[in-house]
C-alpha cells in the first residue's frame, strides 16, 4: 500500500464529536460530491474511506445510504466505490453548508461549519480523505497535495491550511487546482493534525535519517573542499618559494622569510595552521596562522616587485 493509503487507513476509525464530523462530511461532499435535489453521489477508490463516509452519514443524518462497486479503474485495477445518499429537498446538503436555503451550490461552506480550530482540522481531514495525497518520505522529494476541481474550494482549503501556519500554495492546472505543501516540517505537522501518529513516526524516522545523511554529505563535501584548497594553496606556496630562490640570494633574505621557506619545504603538505603549530613547537617562538599567511604574502610581494 502507498503511504497515502496507510495514513487514510489509520485515521478512518478515529471517533470525533458530531460538530467535527459534520465539518469532515462538508469537505467530502463539497469536493467529491455530485449533488441533485434528492441525492448526493460520491465516487471513491479507497474502500476504507467509503466505509467511513457511510458511517458518518448514518450517524449524523439517519438517512438511506447505498454503497456499491461501480467499476474498475483499468489504470491500476482499483475498484471504484459508488456511494449514494438520499437527500430529500437538499436537507443534508444544507446542513453541511454546501448549498444555501434556495438550493444554490456553495463551494466554500457557511461559517458555522468551521467555527473553531478543531472543526477546521476536521474539514481538512475530510479534504485529505477525498482528494489528498502525500509522497512517501523515502522518495526524492517531500510533497503533499489536494487536487480540487473548483477554484473557490481550492482557495478555501488553502486559506484553512495557512490559518494553521502550514504555508501551502495553490497551483492552476489544466482542468483543476492543486493545493500543495513542499516543506518537510509542514507536511509532518499536517500528518500530526490528522492524528495519524503511526505514520507520523515513520515519516519522522525517514526524514531524520535523510537529513542526517544530507548533513554528512555536506560535511564530507566541505572537508574535501578544504583539502583541495590546502593542496592548491600548498602548491602555490612551494612554487613561490622556488621562484624566490631563483631571483634572490636565499642567504640574504630576512630570517622570518627563510624560516617559513625551510619549514614549508620540510612539511610540504601541511596547512598554514599546521605549519604555525610545527614552527611554534620546534623553535619555541609562538607564531599564528595569520603570521604564517603574512609571510607567504610577503614572499609573493617580493616576487612581484622583482618582476
Image: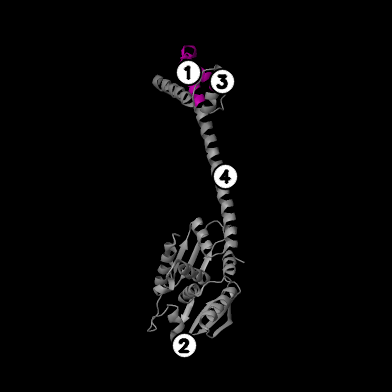
Q: Residues within 10 Å of mark 2 (few under 14, many from 20)?
A: some
Disc 4 to disc 1, how far (Cα)? 40 Å
Q: Nearer the viewer, residue 306 or 186?
A: 186
Q: Which mark is residue 257?
A: 1
Left or right, 155 with reference to 82: left
Disc 3 to disc 4, how far (Cα)? 34 Å
Asked whether disc 2 touches disc 4, contact meaning CB atoms under 8 Å apart, the reply is no
Give the labeled residue for mark 3: 281
Asked whether disc 1 touches disc 3, contact meaning CB atoms under 8 Å apart, the reply is no
Between discs 3 and 2, the one toward the N terminus: 2
Magenta stretch: give its range.
237-264
Rendering quarter of residue 2:
bottom right
Q: Nearer the viewer, residue 121 or 259?
A: 121
Between discs 1 and 3, the one toward the N terminus: 1
Disc 1 to disc 3, how far (Cα)? 18 Å
Disc 3 to disc 2, how far (Cα)? 94 Å
- Mark 3: secondary structure: helix
Q: Quadrant of the N terminus?
A: bottom right
Residue 10 in sight here: yes
Asked whether disc 4 touches disc 1, contact meaning CB atoms under 8 Å apart, the reply is no
Q: Which mark is residue 216?
A: 4
Between discs 3 and 4, the one toward the N terminus: 4
Give the labeled residue for mark 2: 88
> Could you tell me what secondary structure mostly forms the magenta stretch?
helix
- Mark 1: secondary structure: helix
- Mark 4: secondary structure: helix
Between discs 2 and 1, the one toward the N terminus: 2
Between discs 4 and 1, the one toward the N terminus: 4
Q: Of the residues tagged 2 and 1, which is closer to the observer? A: 2
Residue at 41% over, 69% down: 156
x then y, percent, for residue 36: 45, 85
Amino acid at each position: 500500500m502507498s503511504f497515502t493509503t496507510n495514513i487514510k487507513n489509520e485515521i478512518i476509525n478515529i471517533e470525533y464529536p458530531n460538530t467535527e464530523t459534520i465539518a469532515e462530511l462538508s469537505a467530502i461532499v463539497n469536493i467529491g460530491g455530485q449533488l441533485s435535489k434528492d441525492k448526493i453521489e460520491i465516487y471513491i477508490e479507497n474502500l476504507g474511506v467509503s466505509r467511513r463516509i457511510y458511517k458518518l452519514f448514518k450517524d449524523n443524518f439517519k438517512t438511506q445510504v447505498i454503497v456499491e462497486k461501480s467499476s474498475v479503474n483499468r489504470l491500476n485495477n482499483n475498484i471504484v466505490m459508488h456511494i449514494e445518499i438520499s437527500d430529500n429537498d437538499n436537507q443534508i446538503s444544507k446542513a453541511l453548508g454546501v448549498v444555501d436555503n434556495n438550493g444554490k451550490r456553495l463551494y466554500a461552506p457557511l461559517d458555522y461549519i468551521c467555527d473553531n480550530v478543531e472543526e477546521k482540522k476536521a474539514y481538512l481531514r475530510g479534504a485529505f480523505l477525498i482528494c489528498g495525497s502525500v509522497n512517501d518520505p523515502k522518495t526524492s522529494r517531500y510533497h503533499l497535495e489536494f487536487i480540487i476541481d473548483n477554484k473557490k474550494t481550492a482557495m478555501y482549503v488553502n486559506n484553512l491550511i495557512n490559518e494553521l501556519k502550514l504555508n501551502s500554495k495553490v497551483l492552476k492546472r489544466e482542468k483543476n487546482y492543486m493545493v500543495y505543501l513542499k516543506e518537510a516540517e509542514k507536511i509532518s505537522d499536517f500528518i500530526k493534525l490528522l492524528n495519524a501518529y503511526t505514520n507520523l513516526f515513520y515519516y519522522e524516522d525517514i526524514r531524520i535519517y535523510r537529513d542526517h545523511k544530507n548533513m554528512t554529505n555536506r560535511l564530507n563535501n566541505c572537508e574535501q573542499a578544504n583539502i583541495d584548497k590546502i593542496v592548491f594553496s600548498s602548491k602555490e606556496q612551494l612554487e613561490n618559494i622556488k621562484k624566490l630562490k631563483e631571483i634572490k640570494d636565499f642567504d640574504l633574505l630576512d630570517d622570518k622569510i627563510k624560516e617559513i621557506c625551510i619549514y614549508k619545504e620540510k612539511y610540504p603538505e601541511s596547512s598554514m595552521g599546521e605549519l604555525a603549530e610545527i614552527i611554534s613547537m620546534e623553535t619555541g617562538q609562538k607564531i599564528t596562522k595569520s603570521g604564517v599567511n603574512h609571510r607567504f604574502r610577503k614572499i609573493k610581494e617580493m616576487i612581484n616587485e622583482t618582476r
